[in-house]
Image: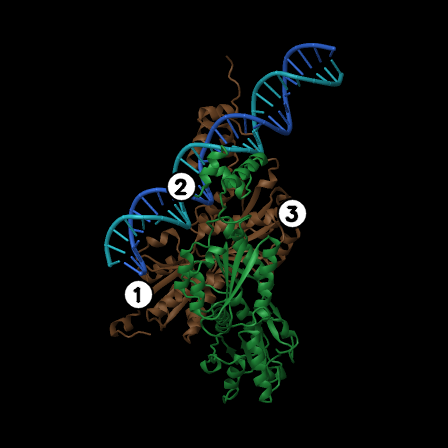
Chain colours: A brown, B green, C blue, D cyan
Amino acid sequence: MVKKKPTMRDVAREANVSPAAVWMAIHNKPGVASETSQRIWETISRLGYTVKSVSDDPVAHTVGLLIEKGSIPAIMDSFYGDVIRGFQSEAQRNGYHVNLVMYDRVHERLDLLRNGFTRSIAGLAVANDGDITPDMVIELKKTNLPVILIENHLDSEYIPCVLGDNFTAGYMATRYLLSLGHQDIAVLPGPEKYSSLVDRLRGCMAAMAEVGLLIPPEWLPKPLSGYPLKGYQQMKEIIALDRRPTAVVAISDKTAIGAMEAIREFGLQIPDDIAIASIDNIAESAYTRPSLTTVHVPKMEMGILAFQRLHHLITSKNDIPVKNIVYSELIVRESSGPARNLSLTGDRI
Amino acid sequence: MVKKKPTMRDVAREANVSPAAVWMAIHNKPGVASETSQRIWETISRLGYTVKSVSDDPVAHTVGLLIEKGSIPAIMDSFYGDVIRGFQSEAQRNGYHVNLVMYDRVHERLDLLRNGFTRSIAGLAVANDGDITPDMVIELKKTNLPVILIENHLDSEYIPCVLGDNFTAGYMATRYLLSLGHQDIAVLPGPEKYSSLVDRLRGCMAAMAEVGLLIPPEWLPKPLSGYPLKGYQQMKEIIALDRRPTAVVAISDKTAIGAMEAIREFGLQIPDDIAIASIDNIAESAYTRPSLTTVHVPKMEMGILAFQRLHHLITSKNDIPVKNIVYSELIVRESSGPARNLSLTGDRI
DNA sequence: TTATCGATTTGTTTAGTAAACACCTGAGGA
DNA sequence: TCCTCAGGTGTTTACTAAACAAATCGATAA
């Protein structure tokens, strides 16, 4: 007896379900419980059943996800790792393939756009890219391809985007330090080309301004490009000053980790000498010594949302460009504490 | 033997189908053959079964739109008129009825929530209400009714909402005046209970802070409740001061119109003595003398979007709560001009 | 008398099937 | 060579069992 190619009905019999159930599992339509679906898929691979062309048109079920190589290895990166995971899983759930593309330089990306890459996908998500200029966005728009920006936005071009609540995050972190009695607060900003980091900084400034304070320029050191942990250099500059702040807001957890290193190296205590708070809540920040007070940004949810909105753009045209902003939450850990002189006297603001 | 009211299961047994089939026939969902459906309907009338939620289920196609009576007459109101128009037209396009409800006081709204109002609608939009407290939101959430907030948000409760880009609008207006060379800028804020107005103010503050400026407290007069054109009173306070600003940001066009009245009354020229910019771009602001420089907020689009998102919440549960923010645009008109002393010397910032 | 709780009824949704359907394919006959 | 028609394959429809949620109704307690 010769082995014949197994059919859908063979799989169904083997997995103790109906052919219809197998079909639904393959096309992940509603009507199969996830555990049943799992059993079916197991059976499929066991019998070596080859699924017919999942989609009539592969282009119609593929989306691009463009990301800087800078944050290599991006998949492992604490922030975009989560975003990518969310995006990809939501895409899969909807029967889409994700064409993940990383690039190094601007011209490389332009090449991509010109070399028919855009014609092999139904939509494109662009993750946090400081180098996306308005011209580039216009060029993208001209292709008529549905595009969504992640953690990036332009106020001159109205493009749908998915963002953390960066302004509120900056505001919350600063506001929290203020509420602990700190008045002398420094901020470690990021490169200006990243709109999300600029928004965070503005949130800090607004929180300060609300209680009648300005951040002195020497407590707002520009980041130097090229250093791996930018916060380290920035913090060293500040520590060297005559007058030191009692608290610091770092624009990202990574910056904070660098800054904490600098503070420790100088022989100061966190939070007693300098309190620190930041933004992101990447996985590491719970395990630093001391653990980091930070503002949680729902990274996985952002990925999911980015796909959902992109999907919507693909299937039903003409909607209103929206900034989709997900909520942030302050996570208080050990790196923040009351201002020293105030805590001793029991004063408060 | 006493006749009892027949139930869905009685009908099902009598018509030789499952209760689910009866249910589908009643709600004409796909999944029942027309002849089966006919038999079911026949049985229904034969047994005298009374269908609960009538015909095509009106509840499923009605949404509530809750709005303060304060902004009377709301339909005519320059801001919410547009929002309501957008919401209603989008609802109509989708076959929904809009149950527009205005109320006066907090307790009146609570009555609404308790008196089964929430059970007569499939979803609820709540327009800009400063009196929506977190408790109230929690109460709303408990009803499990899909809810969307318009021009209002809480950072403590994660509820989907549709907002203008208030922060950016405040930032843009202020930034523009700064770019004209003004340094002495006053801001006319709104009541703190309106989160959208607070956000606008924070945008102003951030723009100022970015160039190292704070708004002096005497140039930031709290609004007095009870006056019809709040800006009028606020501006009078400022004009009476020894040192007057060269420019003013009004938190809304209505405030600006009041402020312009006060400036004119005092015998000063706009924009030569005091420049003014604001936020909203209501219809009137193009026809004031001088016409008003303002930041456009796409009001109609907000209404459309609010319905779209609410519709989505109704039809597919479990999505991520998002702040949906529509883009703003600066509209330069006559009420803004360069700072007088600077324009004469040709200095610029 | 009025709340409160638990059990039961009633309506709704989910996860599944049987059977029909549409489409291809290939062997057999004119 | 062409037709055709049986049967295999994937897909869809019409329906159900069973779980679930919401409303209702008593009994009981406050």
Dividing the image into 4 quarters, which one contains the C terminus of chain A? bottom left
Q: Which chain carries label 2?
A: B
Residue A329, percent across and down? 40, 59
Q: Is mark 3 on a helix, strand or loop?
A: helix
The crowd level at tag 3 (other Cα within 10 Å; few <14, some 14-19, many 20+) is few
Question: Disc 3 residue type?
Answer: Arg
Q: Is residue B184 above or below residue A30?
A: below
Front residue (pair A280, A40):
A40
Q: How far apart are marks 2 and 1 (CA)?
A: 74 Å
Q: Write down the residue under mark 2.
A: B2
Question: Disc 1 residue type?
Answer: Gly
Q: How many marks?
A: 3
Which circle's residue, 3 or 1, is located before the other in the chain? Answer: 3
The crowd level at tag 2 (other Cα within 10 Å; few <14, some 14-19, many 20+) is few
Residue A253, percent across and down? 40, 57
Residue B21, percent across and down? 50, 37
Task: Identify the mark at residue A114; answer none if there is no mark.
Answer: 3
Do callouts 2 and 1 point to residues on the same chain?
A: no
Front residue (pair A223, B225):
B225
Q: Mark 3 lies on which chain?
A: A
Q: What element carries label 1?
A: loop
Q: In this view, does A309 lie above or below B30?
A: below
Task: Identify the mark at residue A261; answer none if there is no mark.
Answer: none
Query: Which dot, 3 or 1, sits closer to the camera?
Result: 1
Question: Disc 2 residue type?
Answer: Val
Residue A55 visible in the picture: yes
Q: Write down the residue under mark 1.
A: A337
Q: Is mark 2 on a helix, strand or loop?
A: loop
Q: Mark 1 lies on which chain?
A: A
Front residue (pair B101, B229):
B101
Contact (CB < 8 A) between labels 2 and 1? no
